[in-house]
Image (tube, rainbow, N blue to C red):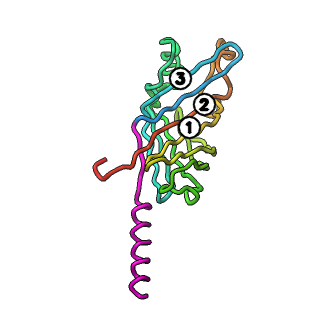
Amino acid sequence: MRTLFFLTVFTLVMWTQSVTGQKYYTKTGRITFLSQAPLEKIESSNNNSLIVLDVATGKLECSVLIKGFQFEKALMQDHFNENYMESYKYPKGLFKGVVTNMQDINMRKDGVYSATIKGDLTLHGVTKPVTTTGKLTIKGGNVAATTSFDIVVADFDIEKPKVVKDNIAEKVKVTVSADLKLMDETN
């Protein structure tokens, strides 16, 4: 009986250590945004965001180079980088937060789990709190993550010239999707 008890405790400790120390990441996370204004629909995407999820703490971080957003029209891309986002001055967008219900997500069991995400989004030199929900799909040890949320352009001190005020929406929809892999010791 004593041996069974110690074996059970040992197994639980080893399992806990193997799950809690895990980090999942990608260097190819996709971030898109959509501005649906009265006169124009503007879409852009960036497929090179770095995303890291620490399973033990729920800590979630995302970094994206602003110049990496691609537009249908080269002129839109130039205006985005030079006039609105000032990417020469503010080269990155950052999110630092946490999946607050990580304890409800079983990383060892395939399935689709709802995630509540809270943190700080930094764009254009301004940091604002963000709370949203997302979805984590666990399949065969890999994680597919998705979320979307709206940001108010003015909240990030992004100025819209009056001449194009009807071309750019007040609120922009941001969508993040990523296939996360288990980070090994060499990453």
Query: Circle 2 sits in a helix, a strand or a loop, which is it?
Result: loop
Query: Circle 1 sits in a helix, a strand or a loop, which is it?
Result: strand
Density class for disc 2 (Cα within 10 Å; few <14, some 14-19, many ≥20) is some
Q: Main secondary structure of the magenta part?
A: helix
Of pointers 2 and 1, the one earlier in the residue sequence? 1
Q: Disc 2 vs disc 3: which is toward the camera? A: 3
Between residue 104 and residue 185, name the one nearer to us.
104
Give the magenta-colored segment's residue range.
1-27
Query: Circle 3 sits in a helix, a strand or a loop, which is it?
Result: strand
Between residue 175 and residue 168, name the one nearer to us.
175
Residue 140 percent coordinates (x, y): 44, 48
Do the numbered discs 3 and 1 sit on residues whose CB atoms are within 8 Å? no
Do the numbered discs 2 and 1 sit on residues whose CB atoms are within 8 Å? yes
Residue 157, which numbered label? 2
Going by the numbered disc 3, the residue's amino acid type is Ser
Residue holding disc 1 = 126
Residue holding disc 3 = 44
Of pointers 3 and 1, the one earlier in the residue sequence? 3
Density class for disc 3 (Cα within 10 Å; few <14, some 14-19, many ≥20) is some
Taking 147 as reference, is 22 above or below it?
A: below
